[in-house]
Image (cartoon, helix red, strand yellow):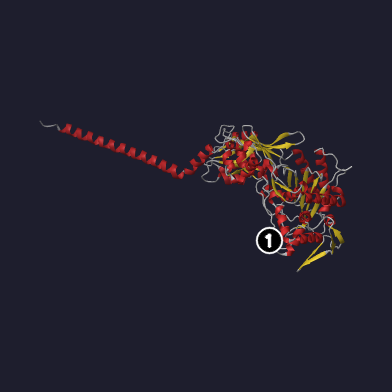
Amino acid sequence: MAVPLRANGALNHNRGLSGARLYVCAFFVLFGSAVIFYRLISVMFFQHSYFVQEAKSQYNNPSALLAGRGGIYLSDLSTGNNVLAAANKNSYFVFGNNYKIESPDDAAVKVSEIVNIPVEELKTKLNEAGKSYQVLAHNITKEQADKITKLKVDGISSASEISRQYQFSPEISSVSGFVGFKGEERIGQYGVEGYYEDFLSGKLKTQEILGNETYSKIYNFLKLNGDKTANNTDKNSENSADGSAGYKGVDLVLAIDPNIQSYVSTKLNELMKRWTPEKGMAIVQDPNTGEILAMVASPGYDSNNYNDFKMDNYINPNIQEYFEPGSSFKSITMAAALDTGAVTPETTYRDPGQVKFDDFTIQNYDEKAHGVQTMRQVLEFSLNTGAIFAQKRTGDDNFLNYVVNFGFGQKTGVDLAGEISGSIANLYSGRKVNFATASFGQGIAVTPIQLITAYSAIANGGKIMWPHVVKEIVRPDGTHDKINPKILNMAIKEKTSALMKSMLVDVVDKGFDKAKVDGYDVAGKTGTAQIPDPEGGYLGNDEFIHDFVGFAPAYAPRFSILLRIDKPVGAKFASNTLPSTFGDITRYLLNYFNIPPTRS
Protein backbone atom coordinates (compact mmCIF):
# COMPACT_ATOMS: atom_id res chain seq x y z
CA MET A 1 0.00 0.00 0.00
CA ALA A 2 1.37 3.32 -1.03
CA VAL A 3 1.98 6.01 1.63
CA PRO A 4 0.34 9.33 0.88
CA LEU A 5 2.79 12.00 -0.26
CA ARG A 6 1.51 14.62 2.33
CA ALA A 7 2.03 12.20 5.19
CA ASN A 8 5.54 11.54 4.02
CA GLY A 9 6.27 15.27 3.90
CA ALA A 10 4.92 15.81 7.43
CA LEU A 11 7.22 13.14 8.78
CA ASN A 12 10.28 14.80 7.27
CA HIS A 13 9.20 18.13 8.72
CA ASN A 14 8.95 16.71 12.28
CA ARG A 15 12.40 15.21 11.94
CA GLY A 16 13.76 18.67 11.01
CA LEU A 17 12.19 20.26 14.07
CA SER A 18 13.73 17.64 16.37
CA GLY A 19 17.21 18.30 14.95
CA ALA A 20 16.86 22.06 15.51
CA ARG A 21 15.86 21.56 19.15
CA LEU A 22 18.87 19.36 19.64
CA TYR A 23 21.20 22.03 18.28
CA VAL A 24 19.60 24.70 20.48
CA CYS A 25 19.96 22.56 23.61
CA ALA A 26 23.54 21.74 22.75
CA PHE A 27 24.27 25.42 22.28
CA PHE A 28 22.91 26.35 25.70
CA VAL A 29 24.75 23.48 27.38
CA LEU A 30 28.02 24.54 25.78
CA PHE A 31 27.39 28.22 26.59
CA GLY A 32 26.61 27.43 30.21
CA SER A 33 29.71 25.29 30.49
CA ALA A 34 31.78 28.11 29.02
CA VAL A 35 30.37 30.59 31.56
CA ILE A 36 31.08 28.23 34.47
CA PHE A 37 34.57 27.55 33.15
CA TYR A 38 35.25 31.27 32.77
CA ARG A 39 33.98 31.89 36.29
CA LEU A 40 36.19 29.16 37.63
CA ILE A 41 39.24 30.57 35.86
CA SER A 42 38.34 34.06 37.10
CA VAL A 43 38.07 32.91 40.70
CA MET A 44 41.25 30.88 40.54
CA PHE A 45 43.42 33.48 38.87
CA PHE A 46 41.98 36.94 38.24
CA GLN A 47 40.16 37.31 41.59
CA HIS A 48 42.41 35.10 43.64
CA SER A 49 43.74 37.97 45.75
CA TYR A 50 40.21 39.20 46.44
CA PHE A 51 39.11 35.96 48.02
CA VAL A 52 42.39 35.46 49.85
CA GLN A 53 42.02 38.89 51.42
CA GLU A 54 38.37 38.20 52.19
CA ALA A 55 39.31 34.95 53.89
CA LYS A 56 42.08 36.61 55.84
CA SER A 57 39.82 39.41 56.97
CA GLN A 58 37.37 36.87 58.36
CA TYR A 59 39.86 34.39 59.77
CA ASN A 60 42.75 36.51 61.04
CA ASN A 61 40.78 38.88 63.25
CA PRO A 62 43.26 41.24 64.94
CA SER A 63 40.83 41.87 67.80
CA ALA A 64 40.54 38.16 68.47
CA LEU A 65 44.32 37.85 68.63
CA LEU A 66 44.56 40.71 71.15
CA ALA A 67 41.57 39.77 73.31
CA GLY A 68 43.47 37.24 75.40
CA ARG A 69 46.66 39.32 75.78
CA GLY A 70 47.86 39.56 79.36
CA GLY A 71 47.99 42.78 81.32
CA ILE A 72 51.02 44.67 82.59
CA TYR A 73 51.07 45.94 86.18
CA LEU A 74 53.35 48.26 88.15
CA SER A 75 54.31 47.67 91.80
CA ASP A 76 53.27 50.45 94.17
CA LEU A 77 55.71 49.86 97.00
CA SER A 78 54.02 52.45 99.23
CA THR A 79 50.79 50.42 99.38
CA GLY A 80 51.89 46.94 98.34
CA ASN A 81 49.31 46.96 95.55
CA ASN A 82 49.75 46.28 91.85
CA VAL A 83 48.53 49.02 89.53
CA LEU A 84 47.31 48.24 86.01
CA ALA A 85 49.54 49.88 83.40
CA ALA A 86 48.59 48.18 80.12
CA ALA A 87 45.31 46.49 79.27
CA ASN A 88 42.93 45.81 76.40
CA LYS A 89 40.01 48.12 75.62
CA ASN A 90 37.22 48.32 73.05
CA SER A 91 37.75 50.80 70.24
CA TYR A 92 36.82 51.21 66.56
CA PHE A 93 38.50 51.15 63.17
CA VAL A 94 37.55 52.01 59.58
CA PHE A 95 38.34 49.76 56.62
CA GLY A 96 37.78 49.71 52.89
CA ASN A 97 37.02 47.26 50.08
CA ASN A 98 38.48 48.76 46.90
CA TYR A 99 36.44 46.41 44.70
CA LYS A 100 33.21 48.06 45.85
CA ILE A 101 34.24 51.73 45.91
CA GLU A 102 32.94 53.55 42.82
CA SER A 103 34.78 56.84 43.39
CA PRO A 104 37.94 56.31 45.49
CA ASP A 105 38.96 59.98 45.46
CA ASP A 106 35.56 61.18 46.67
CA ALA A 107 35.52 58.47 49.35
CA ALA A 108 38.99 59.54 50.49
CA VAL A 109 37.87 63.14 50.97
CA LYS A 110 34.83 62.13 53.01
CA VAL A 111 36.76 59.70 55.23
CA SER A 112 39.61 62.19 55.75
CA GLU A 113 37.21 64.78 57.16
CA ILE A 114 36.17 62.31 59.86
CA VAL A 115 39.35 60.47 60.86
CA ASN A 116 41.89 63.26 60.29
CA ILE A 117 44.12 61.29 57.94
CA PRO A 118 45.62 63.17 54.96
CA VAL A 119 43.47 62.91 51.85
CA GLU A 120 46.38 61.94 49.62
CA GLU A 121 47.30 59.06 51.90
CA LEU A 122 43.74 57.72 51.74
CA LYS A 123 43.55 58.22 47.97
CA THR A 124 46.67 56.10 47.54
CA LYS A 125 45.18 53.30 49.61
CA LEU A 126 41.73 53.38 48.06
CA ASN A 127 43.08 53.42 44.49
CA GLU A 128 45.33 50.42 45.09
CA ALA A 129 44.33 47.51 42.89
CA GLY A 130 43.52 44.08 44.27
CA LYS A 131 42.62 45.25 47.78
CA SER A 132 39.37 43.88 49.12
CA TYR A 133 40.23 44.56 52.75
CA GLN A 134 42.55 47.14 54.23
CA VAL A 135 42.42 49.10 57.46
CA LEU A 136 42.38 52.85 56.90
CA ALA A 137 42.48 54.00 60.53
CA HIS A 138 42.72 52.38 63.96
CA ASN A 139 41.66 53.68 67.38
CA ILE A 140 38.88 55.92 66.20
CA THR A 141 36.07 56.93 68.56
CA LYS A 142 32.51 55.59 68.50
CA GLU A 143 31.34 58.98 67.25
CA GLN A 144 33.76 58.78 64.31
CA ALA A 145 32.67 55.21 63.60
CA ASP A 146 29.03 56.29 63.55
CA LYS A 147 29.82 59.09 61.10
CA ILE A 148 31.57 56.62 58.81
CA THR A 149 28.46 54.43 58.85
CA LYS A 150 26.21 57.41 58.04
CA LEU A 151 28.30 58.20 54.94
CA LYS A 152 26.75 55.12 53.29
CA VAL A 153 29.68 54.85 50.88
CA ASP A 154 29.83 51.38 49.33
CA GLY A 155 33.11 49.73 50.29
CA ILE A 156 33.77 51.90 53.37
CA SER A 157 32.83 50.47 56.77
CA SER A 158 33.66 50.72 60.45
CA ALA A 159 33.75 48.06 63.14
CA SER A 160 34.69 47.56 66.76
CA GLU A 161 38.01 46.06 67.79
CA ILE A 162 40.12 45.55 70.87
CA SER A 163 43.14 47.83 71.29
CA ARG A 164 45.87 48.30 73.89
CA GLN A 165 45.66 51.13 76.41
CA TYR A 166 48.57 52.39 78.51
CA GLN A 167 47.61 54.13 81.74
CA PHE A 168 50.98 55.75 82.52
CA SER A 169 52.06 56.75 79.03
CA PRO A 170 54.24 58.54 78.08
CA GLU A 171 56.13 58.20 81.40
CA ILE A 172 56.30 54.42 81.08
CA SER A 173 56.58 54.11 77.29
CA SER A 174 60.35 53.47 77.14
CA VAL A 175 59.78 50.45 79.40
CA SER A 176 56.39 49.21 78.23
CA GLY A 177 56.86 49.48 74.46
CA PHE A 178 53.60 49.03 72.58
CA VAL A 179 51.46 46.56 70.63
CA GLY A 180 51.77 47.58 67.01
CA PHE A 181 50.82 46.25 63.62
CA LYS A 182 53.09 44.08 61.53
CA GLY A 183 50.93 43.93 58.44
CA GLU A 184 47.54 43.09 59.92
CA GLU A 185 49.00 41.11 62.83
CA ARG A 186 49.35 42.76 66.19
CA ILE A 187 52.56 42.02 68.06
CA GLY A 188 54.46 43.53 70.96
CA GLN A 189 57.24 45.89 69.92
CA TYR A 190 60.02 47.39 72.05
CA GLY A 191 60.25 47.26 75.82
CA VAL A 192 58.36 44.67 77.84
CA GLU A 193 55.70 44.21 75.15
CA GLY A 194 58.37 43.14 72.66
CA TYR A 195 60.55 41.06 74.97
CA TYR A 196 57.64 39.13 76.50
CA GLU A 197 55.53 38.93 73.31
CA ASP A 198 55.06 35.16 73.47
CA PHE A 199 54.23 35.30 77.18
CA LEU A 200 51.70 38.12 76.91
CA SER A 201 50.04 36.95 73.71
CA GLY A 202 49.66 33.35 74.84
CA LYS A 203 51.01 32.14 71.49
CA LEU A 204 53.14 29.52 73.17
CA LYS A 205 52.25 27.01 75.83
CA THR A 206 54.47 26.77 78.88
CA GLN A 207 56.45 23.82 77.56
CA GLU A 208 57.10 25.67 74.30
CA ILE A 209 58.24 28.76 76.19
CA LEU A 210 60.65 26.62 78.21
CA GLY A 211 62.27 25.53 74.96
CA ASN A 212 62.45 29.01 73.49
CA GLU A 213 65.99 30.38 73.66
CA THR A 214 64.84 33.97 74.08
CA TYR A 215 62.79 33.23 77.16
CA SER A 216 64.39 30.13 78.65
CA LYS A 217 66.47 32.48 80.78
CA ILE A 218 63.41 33.53 82.77
CA TYR A 219 62.26 30.02 83.51
CA ASN A 220 65.77 28.78 84.13
CA PHE A 221 66.00 31.41 86.84
CA LEU A 222 62.76 30.11 88.32
CA LYS A 223 64.02 26.53 88.29
CA LEU A 224 67.43 27.44 89.69
CA ASN A 225 65.77 29.27 92.55
CA GLY A 226 63.48 26.40 93.40
CA ASP A 227 60.19 27.81 92.13
CA LYS A 228 57.96 24.76 91.81
CA THR A 229 55.57 26.44 89.41
CA ALA A 230 58.30 26.65 86.78
CA ASN A 231 57.76 22.97 86.02
CA ASN A 232 53.98 22.90 86.38
CA THR A 233 51.88 20.88 83.98
CA ASP A 234 50.67 23.35 81.40
CA LYS A 235 47.60 25.18 82.65
CA ASN A 236 47.67 27.88 80.03
CA SER A 237 45.52 26.04 77.51
CA GLU A 238 42.17 27.75 77.97
CA ASN A 239 40.66 29.66 75.08
CA SER A 240 40.97 33.40 74.87
CA ALA A 241 38.37 35.58 76.54
CA ASP A 242 36.40 36.08 73.34
CA GLY A 243 36.37 32.39 72.48
CA SER A 244 39.02 32.63 69.77
CA ALA A 245 41.47 29.80 69.33
CA GLY A 246 44.77 30.07 71.15
CA TYR A 247 45.99 30.56 74.69
CA LYS A 248 45.45 33.26 77.25
CA GLY A 249 48.48 35.40 77.86
CA VAL A 250 50.08 35.74 81.27
CA ASP A 251 50.00 38.94 83.30
CA LEU A 252 53.31 40.62 84.11
CA VAL A 253 54.01 42.51 87.33
CA LEU A 254 56.88 44.95 86.88
CA ALA A 255 59.26 46.12 89.57
CA ILE A 256 58.66 49.65 88.27
CA ASP A 257 57.02 51.75 90.98
CA PRO A 258 54.57 54.31 89.52
CA ASN A 259 55.40 56.89 92.20
CA ILE A 260 59.16 56.65 91.71
CA GLN A 261 58.73 56.56 87.92
CA SER A 262 56.58 59.69 88.01
CA TYR A 263 58.95 61.64 90.25
CA VAL A 264 62.05 60.70 88.26
CA SER A 265 60.25 61.59 85.03
CA THR A 266 59.36 65.01 86.45
CA LYS A 267 62.94 65.71 87.53
CA LEU A 268 64.30 64.59 84.16
CA ASN A 269 61.87 66.92 82.39
CA GLU A 270 63.13 69.76 84.57
CA LEU A 271 66.69 68.94 83.52
CA MET A 272 65.64 68.96 79.88
CA LYS A 273 64.07 72.40 80.23
CA ARG A 274 66.97 73.84 82.22
CA TRP A 275 69.84 72.65 80.02
CA THR A 276 68.07 71.88 76.70
CA PRO A 277 70.14 68.77 75.92
CA GLU A 278 69.45 66.62 72.87
CA LYS A 279 68.32 63.78 75.10
CA GLY A 280 68.19 62.67 78.72
CA MET A 281 67.70 59.46 80.65
CA ALA A 282 67.49 58.12 84.18
CA ILE A 283 67.43 54.74 85.95
CA VAL A 284 66.72 53.77 89.56
CA GLN A 285 67.74 50.24 90.53
CA ASP A 286 67.60 48.14 93.67
CA PRO A 287 71.30 47.16 93.98
CA ASN A 288 70.50 44.12 96.12
CA THR A 289 68.08 42.45 93.71
CA GLY A 290 68.82 44.04 90.34
CA GLU A 291 65.19 45.14 89.99
CA ILE A 292 64.60 48.29 87.96
CA LEU A 293 62.39 50.63 90.02
CA ALA A 294 62.28 53.42 87.42
CA MET A 295 63.53 53.96 83.89
CA VAL A 296 62.86 57.12 81.89
CA ALA A 297 64.02 58.52 78.55
CA SER A 298 63.48 61.93 76.95
CA PRO A 299 62.40 62.72 74.31
CA GLY A 300 60.04 59.80 74.47
CA TYR A 301 56.70 58.93 72.90
CA ASP A 302 53.14 58.01 73.80
CA SER A 303 52.45 54.27 73.52
CA ASN A 304 48.77 55.04 73.00
CA ASN A 305 49.57 57.09 69.89
CA TYR A 306 52.89 55.66 68.77
CA ASN A 307 52.12 56.33 65.10
CA ASP A 308 52.39 60.05 65.83
CA PHE A 309 56.11 59.72 66.59
CA LYS A 310 59.24 58.94 64.63
CA MET A 311 60.84 55.52 65.03
CA ASP A 312 63.86 57.14 66.70
CA ASN A 313 61.64 57.95 69.66
CA TYR A 314 60.92 54.27 70.22
CA ILE A 315 64.58 53.60 71.05
CA ASN A 316 65.25 53.28 74.77
CA PRO A 317 68.73 54.82 75.14
CA ASN A 318 69.13 53.26 78.58
CA ILE A 319 69.65 49.89 76.90
CA GLN A 320 69.84 50.55 73.15
CA GLU A 321 72.50 53.26 72.90
CA TYR A 322 76.04 53.38 74.20
CA PHE A 323 78.27 56.31 75.15
CA GLU A 324 81.72 57.04 76.51
CA PRO A 325 81.08 57.51 80.25
CA GLY A 326 84.03 59.73 81.15
CA SER A 327 85.09 60.10 84.78
CA SER A 328 82.31 57.97 86.26
CA PHE A 329 84.35 55.04 84.92
CA LYS A 330 87.22 55.97 87.25
CA SER A 331 85.33 54.14 89.99
CA ILE A 332 85.67 50.92 87.99
CA THR A 333 89.38 51.55 87.45
CA MET A 334 89.93 52.26 91.13
CA ALA A 335 87.91 49.23 92.22
CA ALA A 336 90.09 47.00 90.02
CA ALA A 337 93.29 48.55 91.45
CA LEU A 338 92.10 48.12 95.03
CA ASP A 339 90.86 44.56 94.47
CA THR A 340 94.21 43.41 93.06
CA GLY A 341 96.11 45.11 95.88
CA ALA A 342 97.89 47.38 93.42
CA VAL A 343 96.89 50.43 95.50
CA THR A 344 95.15 51.38 98.74
CA PRO A 345 92.96 54.44 99.27
CA GLU A 346 96.00 56.20 100.78
CA THR A 347 98.53 55.28 98.08
CA THR A 348 100.10 58.47 96.74
CA TYR A 349 101.55 59.59 93.42
CA ARG A 350 102.84 62.89 92.13
CA ASP A 351 100.44 64.43 89.62
CA PRO A 352 102.38 66.05 86.77
CA GLY A 353 99.22 67.41 85.15
CA GLN A 354 99.74 65.42 81.97
CA VAL A 355 100.96 62.06 80.69
CA LYS A 356 102.47 61.37 77.26
CA PHE A 357 102.03 58.25 75.13
CA ASP A 358 104.01 58.42 71.89
CA ASP A 359 102.28 61.22 69.97
CA PHE A 360 99.45 61.60 72.50
CA THR A 361 99.38 63.92 75.49
CA ILE A 362 96.66 63.34 78.10
CA GLN A 363 95.84 66.12 80.54
CA ASN A 364 93.64 66.58 83.58
CA TYR A 365 90.28 68.20 82.94
CA ASP A 366 91.55 71.51 84.39
CA GLU A 367 94.90 71.21 82.58
CA LYS A 368 96.74 71.65 85.92
CA ALA A 369 99.26 69.68 87.97
CA HIS A 370 98.15 68.95 91.54
CA GLY A 371 101.33 67.62 93.14
CA VAL A 372 101.19 64.68 95.57
CA GLN A 373 97.72 63.12 95.71
CA THR A 374 96.17 60.00 97.30
CA MET A 375 93.85 57.60 95.48
CA ARG A 376 90.96 59.09 97.45
CA GLN A 377 91.86 62.48 96.04
CA VAL A 378 92.08 61.04 92.54
CA LEU A 379 88.34 60.35 92.74
CA GLU A 380 87.54 63.52 94.68
CA PHE A 381 89.31 65.80 92.18
CA SER A 382 88.63 63.47 89.21
CA LEU A 383 92.25 63.38 88.06
CA ASN A 384 92.89 61.67 84.73
CA THR A 385 96.56 61.20 85.56
CA GLY A 386 95.61 59.43 88.79
CA ALA A 387 93.30 57.02 86.96
CA ILE A 388 96.15 56.25 84.55
CA PHE A 389 98.48 55.66 87.52
CA ALA A 390 96.01 53.19 89.11
CA GLN A 391 95.49 51.37 85.80
CA LYS A 392 99.24 51.01 85.24
CA ARG A 393 99.66 49.58 88.74
CA THR A 394 96.84 47.10 88.04
CA GLY A 395 98.32 45.92 84.72
CA ASP A 396 96.68 45.72 81.32
CA ASP A 397 95.53 42.09 81.53
CA ASN A 398 94.12 42.47 85.02
CA PHE A 399 92.41 45.72 84.11
CA LEU A 400 90.76 44.12 81.07
CA ASN A 401 89.59 41.18 83.17
CA TYR A 402 87.94 43.49 85.70
CA VAL A 403 86.25 45.51 82.99
CA VAL A 404 84.78 42.29 81.60
CA ASN A 405 83.84 41.01 85.09
CA PHE A 406 81.95 44.23 85.74
CA GLY A 407 79.85 43.38 82.67
CA PHE A 408 81.12 45.83 80.06
CA GLY A 409 81.36 44.81 76.42
CA GLN A 410 78.50 42.32 76.84
CA LYS A 411 74.75 42.43 77.26
CA THR A 412 73.41 42.47 80.79
CA GLY A 413 70.44 40.32 79.77
CA VAL A 414 67.91 42.89 80.97
CA ASP A 415 64.41 41.77 80.02
CA LEU A 416 63.66 44.56 77.56
CA ALA A 417 63.71 44.24 73.79
CA GLY A 418 66.70 45.41 71.78
CA GLU A 419 69.55 45.60 74.29
CA ILE A 420 73.01 46.20 72.81
CA SER A 421 76.38 45.27 74.26
CA GLY A 422 78.51 48.42 74.07
CA SER A 423 82.15 48.12 73.03
CA ILE A 424 85.50 47.64 74.74
CA ALA A 425 87.22 46.62 71.50
CA ASN A 426 90.00 49.17 72.05
CA LEU A 427 91.26 47.16 75.00
CA TYR A 428 91.97 44.19 72.75
CA SER A 429 94.33 46.22 70.58
CA GLY A 430 97.18 46.02 73.09
CA ARG A 431 97.96 49.75 72.72
CA LYS A 432 99.00 51.39 75.97
CA VAL A 433 97.26 54.65 75.12
CA ASN A 434 93.92 52.82 74.80
CA PHE A 435 94.25 51.42 78.32
CA ALA A 436 95.19 54.88 79.57
CA THR A 437 92.15 56.58 78.06
CA ALA A 438 89.85 53.74 79.14
CA SER A 439 90.96 54.27 82.75
CA PHE A 440 89.07 57.57 82.78
CA GLY A 441 86.19 56.46 80.55
CA GLN A 442 87.21 57.49 77.03
CA GLY A 443 87.69 55.20 74.03
CA ILE A 444 85.27 52.60 75.37
CA ALA A 445 81.49 52.60 75.06
CA VAL A 446 79.00 51.48 77.70
CA THR A 447 75.24 51.48 78.07
CA PRO A 448 73.50 53.16 81.01
CA ILE A 449 72.13 49.80 82.19
CA GLN A 450 75.68 48.39 82.25
CA LEU A 451 77.01 51.38 84.19
CA ILE A 452 74.35 51.41 86.89
CA THR A 453 74.60 47.63 87.28
CA ALA A 454 78.37 48.01 87.83
CA TYR A 455 77.81 50.74 90.44
CA SER A 456 75.18 48.56 92.11
CA ALA A 457 77.90 45.90 92.43
CA ILE A 458 80.15 48.41 94.19
CA ALA A 459 77.20 49.18 96.47
CA ASN A 460 76.09 45.63 97.30
CA GLY A 461 79.39 44.00 98.19
CA GLY A 462 80.68 43.19 94.71
CA LYS A 463 77.85 41.19 93.14
CA ILE A 464 76.79 41.78 89.55
CA MET A 465 73.03 41.27 89.77
CA TRP A 466 70.91 40.45 86.76
CA PRO A 467 69.02 43.69 86.00
CA HIS A 468 65.35 43.00 85.36
CA VAL A 469 62.04 44.79 85.00
CA VAL A 470 59.55 41.96 85.57
CA LYS A 471 59.31 40.70 89.15
CA GLU A 472 56.36 38.32 88.83
CA ILE A 473 54.49 36.30 86.20
CA VAL A 474 50.82 35.56 86.85
CA ARG A 475 49.35 32.67 84.87
CA PRO A 476 45.70 32.58 83.70
CA ASP A 477 44.90 30.00 86.39
CA GLY A 478 46.09 32.41 89.09
CA THR A 479 49.40 30.76 89.95
CA HIS A 480 52.31 33.15 90.48
CA ASP A 481 55.92 32.75 89.36
CA LYS A 482 58.20 35.12 91.24
CA ILE A 483 61.36 36.21 89.44
CA ASN A 484 64.03 35.79 92.07
CA PRO A 485 67.30 37.77 92.20
CA LYS A 486 70.19 36.20 90.30
CA ILE A 487 73.90 36.82 90.81
CA LEU A 488 75.63 36.87 87.42
CA ASN A 489 79.17 37.38 88.65
CA MET A 490 81.38 38.55 91.51
CA ALA A 491 83.17 41.65 90.23
CA ILE A 492 85.14 42.58 93.37
CA LYS A 493 85.61 41.42 96.94
CA GLU A 494 83.32 42.64 99.69
CA LYS A 495 86.29 44.37 101.33
CA THR A 496 86.96 46.28 98.13
CA SER A 497 83.30 47.27 97.98
CA ALA A 498 83.55 48.73 101.49
CA LEU A 499 86.65 50.77 100.56
CA MET A 500 85.00 52.08 97.39
CA LYS A 501 81.91 53.12 99.32
CA SER A 502 83.96 55.26 101.69
CA MET A 503 85.86 56.82 98.79
CA LEU A 504 82.67 57.64 96.87
CA VAL A 505 81.08 59.12 99.99
CA ASP A 506 84.11 61.43 100.21
CA VAL A 507 83.55 62.40 96.57
CA VAL A 508 80.03 63.62 97.37
CA ASP A 509 80.90 65.14 100.76
CA LYS A 510 83.86 67.12 99.47
CA GLY A 511 82.79 67.90 95.94
CA PHE A 512 79.03 68.02 95.44
CA ASP A 513 77.12 70.01 98.04
CA LYS A 514 73.93 69.84 95.96
CA ALA A 515 74.07 66.04 95.86
CA LYS A 516 74.38 65.73 99.63
CA VAL A 517 71.41 64.91 101.85
CA ASP A 518 71.63 65.99 105.49
CA GLY A 519 71.83 63.05 107.86
CA TYR A 520 72.75 60.45 105.23
CA ASP A 521 75.82 58.89 103.64
CA VAL A 522 75.52 59.36 99.89
CA ALA A 523 78.00 57.89 97.39
CA GLY A 524 78.44 59.00 93.80
CA LYS A 525 80.61 60.16 90.93
CA THR A 526 80.11 62.40 87.91
CA GLY A 527 81.32 61.84 84.39
CA THR A 528 81.95 64.37 81.63
CA ALA A 529 82.88 62.80 78.32
CA GLN A 530 83.70 64.03 74.87
CA ILE A 531 81.53 62.73 72.05
CA PRO A 532 83.21 60.75 69.24
CA ASP A 533 83.04 62.31 65.80
CA PRO A 534 81.89 59.76 63.17
CA GLU A 535 84.63 61.09 60.89
CA GLY A 536 87.34 60.64 63.52
CA GLY A 537 88.42 62.31 66.74
CA TYR A 538 85.91 64.08 68.97
CA LEU A 539 83.34 66.83 68.57
CA GLY A 540 83.96 70.41 69.69
CA ASN A 541 84.68 71.70 73.18
CA ASP A 542 81.06 72.67 73.77
CA GLU A 543 79.56 69.21 73.12
CA PHE A 544 79.75 66.71 75.97
CA ILE A 545 77.81 63.93 77.64
CA HIS A 546 77.16 64.37 81.37
CA ASP A 547 76.37 61.54 83.76
CA PHE A 548 76.09 61.02 87.50
CA VAL A 549 75.91 57.57 89.12
CA GLY A 550 75.60 56.83 92.83
CA PHE A 551 73.71 55.11 95.63
CA ALA A 552 72.35 55.59 99.15
CA PRO A 553 72.49 55.02 102.03
CA ALA A 554 76.09 54.26 101.13
CA TYR A 555 76.80 51.57 103.72
CA ALA A 556 73.39 49.86 103.55
CA PRO A 557 72.24 50.78 100.02
CA ARG A 558 68.58 50.60 99.07
CA PHE A 559 68.81 52.19 95.63
CA SER A 560 71.22 53.22 92.88
CA ILE A 561 70.61 56.18 90.57
CA LEU A 562 71.94 57.03 87.11
CA LEU A 563 71.37 60.32 85.32
CA ARG A 564 72.62 61.26 81.86
CA ILE A 565 72.10 64.20 79.50
CA ASP A 566 73.63 64.66 76.04
CA LYS A 567 74.98 67.98 74.77
CA PRO A 568 73.60 70.29 77.47
CA VAL A 569 73.74 73.98 76.59
CA GLY A 570 75.51 76.41 78.92
CA ALA A 571 77.58 74.05 81.08
CA LYS A 572 80.72 72.10 80.26
CA PHE A 573 80.92 69.76 83.25
CA ALA A 574 78.48 67.30 84.80
CA SER A 575 79.33 68.78 88.19
CA ASN A 576 77.39 71.87 87.09
CA THR A 577 74.29 70.18 85.71
CA LEU A 578 73.41 66.95 87.56
CA PRO A 579 74.24 67.00 91.31
CA SER A 580 71.14 68.99 92.29
CA THR A 581 68.78 66.60 90.50
CA PHE A 582 70.67 63.61 91.88
CA GLY A 583 70.27 65.06 95.38
CA ASP A 584 66.54 65.69 94.88
CA ILE A 585 65.89 62.11 93.71
CA THR A 586 68.01 60.70 96.54
CA ARG A 587 66.12 62.77 99.11
CA TYR A 588 62.78 61.68 97.67
CA LEU A 589 63.72 57.98 97.76
CA LEU A 590 65.06 58.15 101.32
CA ASN A 591 61.74 59.62 102.41
CA TYR A 592 59.70 57.26 100.22
CA PHE A 593 61.33 54.18 101.73
CA ASN A 594 61.20 55.75 105.20
CA ILE A 595 64.93 55.12 105.73
CA PRO A 596 66.24 56.45 109.07
CA PRO A 597 69.26 58.80 109.05
CA THR A 598 72.69 57.19 108.97
CA ARG A 599 74.49 60.20 110.42
CA SER A 600 73.87 61.98 113.71
User: In this image, 544 relative to 203: left or right?
Assistant: right
Q: Determine if residue 117 is in view.
A: no
Residue 558, horizontal then vertical, whole percent: 78, 42
- The disc labelled 1 sits on which kind of residue? Tyr
Q: Is residue 403 toward the left or the right of residue 93 in the image?
A: right
Residue 127 quadrant = top right
> Looking at the image, is 528 positioned above or below residue 97?
below
Q: Which residue is mark 1?
A: 428
- Badge 1: residue crowd in 10 Å (few <14, some 14–19, many ≥20): few
Q: Is residue 36 visible?
A: yes
Where is residue 26 drawn, in percent x and y?
31, 38
**Percent of width and height locating residue 215:** 62, 44
Residue farthest to the bottom, as pictured: 358
Query: Could you say where residue 387 lies in the image, as x and y percent from the top left?
Result: 79, 59
- In-image side of 184 versus 303 (left or right): left
Label 1 element class: helix
Q: Quadrant of the C terminus?
A: top right
* Front position in the image: 477 or 313: 477
**Quarter of the N terminus within the rendering:** top left
Residue 476 in which image quadrant: top right
For this view, does 312 lie left or right of residue 8?
right
Q: Nearer the viewer, residue 458 or 131?
A: 458
